[in-house]
Amino acid sequence: MQPKDFLNPKIKKLPPYSLNSEVDLSNIKIKLDANESFLELPGHIQSEALAGLHEIKFNRYPDPSAASLIKKFADYLNARENTGLTPDNIAAGNGTDELLNIIINAFVSKNDKMLVFEPDFSMYAFYGQIIEAGILRLQKKDLKINWSEAADVLKRENIKLALFSNPCNPTGQLENKADIIKFINLARECGAVVVLDEVYMSFCGGRNSLLHEFLEYPNLIIMKSLSKSIGLAALRVGFALSNADFINAVKTIKSPFNLNAVSQKLAETVLGYPDYLEENLKTITQNKKELQEELSKIFTVHPTETNFVLAESAHSGEIFEYLLKNGILVRKLSEKYLRITSGSAEENKELLKCLKLKYQDKPKKQK
């Protein structure tokens, strides 16, 4: 027998998650493919963060509850959003990816049905496939969820869990709050839990967020992250927000020491600078707005509510390869769409310069 013959058959069918993994990053000078913040921590915050590492006992396991970090995050959200959150409503994880996996395992068993939408974050369905759930994929129309079709699925199928992002990754579209609330209430009547991924919500000023009233819905979980607007992608820190019963369930089945002590300590330090983080958010948002305006002169662009731009072109494959040859990495979603993260002003300028050299005078073909 060969090594692959020993694998569980369900794993053999799953393609590994790929984010330009085939690309030689040593040749990349501008990386605009992963929706990361282009802003690095200033020296004084880095110095404070490094000093905080001396408090860590590296021979000991980290706090399994991440209590200090969770309180810091609650304080940050309460000050910024006036939410009144308590630590009892928050669980921390090794990125939202880990928490999504935990949540799916908490509410879904083999052959149970999950509802996801396409296009959306691919890991929702991926984690469901691992536990052999039945994945129902509802195609969006004009990049938006068709709520009437979604309601029909809830009524017709025995859905245990529905997941979607708002604003959406990878389309950047923002769904209507009233539609979401209606869907959550219907899901409750049908016995389904809803996971609302609000990782990109900061970029649209919290518009249409359910952060203030999520406890009114006993079947709702909200996802938050420090990887995007906060700019701590390297630390892999994410949060799930929900009622105390759901949060206790997440804490019960997560691994005992899931979030390392270094990430906890560094994240706490950075969250202590809310004014700095607010200025960063403004800078990222303005850069993306300017990039979107300039790209719309070259391609068909779908306005987004995130830190990335969604460009549509019949030449997307060609454009991707052209940029790659010039040391610029973006995300090719399909032969029709490119997702381009907004970089620094200098990076965006270089991207636009490169594109205009070849595509400025080409018609905006979509088909």
Image (cartoon, rainbow, N blue to C red):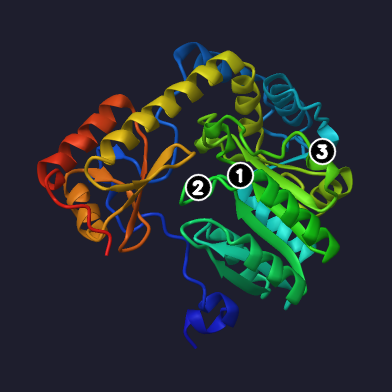
Q: Residue 150, position in %: x, y? A: 66, 65
Query: What is the three-letter code of the residue carrying label 2?
Result: Gln
Nearest to viewer (mark 1 / mark 3)? 3
Q: Residue at x 27, y 40 (%)?
A: 295
Q: Residue at x 81, y 26 (%)?
A: 84
According to the image, label 1 marks what residue?
95
> Looking at the rendered structure, which numbered label has been put on residue 222?
none
Q: Residue at x 66, y 38 (%)?
A: 209
Q: Residues within 10 Å of mark 2 (few under 14, many from 20)?
A: many
Residue pushed farthest right? Answer: 245
Question: From the image, which quarter does the C terminus lie in?
Answer: bottom left
Q: Is residue 157 visible?
A: no
According to the image, label 3 marks what residue?
89
Count of picture labels = 3
Q: Residues within 10 Å of mark 1 (few under 14, many from 20)?
A: many
Query: What is the three-letter code of the residue carrying label 3?
Result: Asn
| Contact (Cβ within 8 Å) of mark 1 with mark 3 | no
**Please, is residue 32 above or below residue 280 in the view?**
below
Name which of mark 2 and mark 3 comes first in the sequence: 3
- Distance of label 2 from label 1 (alpha carbons): 22 Å
Q: Residue 267, position in %: x, y? A: 62, 27
**Please, is residue 249 above or below residue 212 in the view?**
below
**Please, is residue 336 above or below residue 92 in the view?**
below
Q: Secondary structure at mark 1?
A: helix
Q: Is residue 195 visible?
A: yes
**Please, is residue 94 above or below residue 71 in the view?**
below
Query: What is the three-letter code of the residue carrying label 1?
Result: Gly
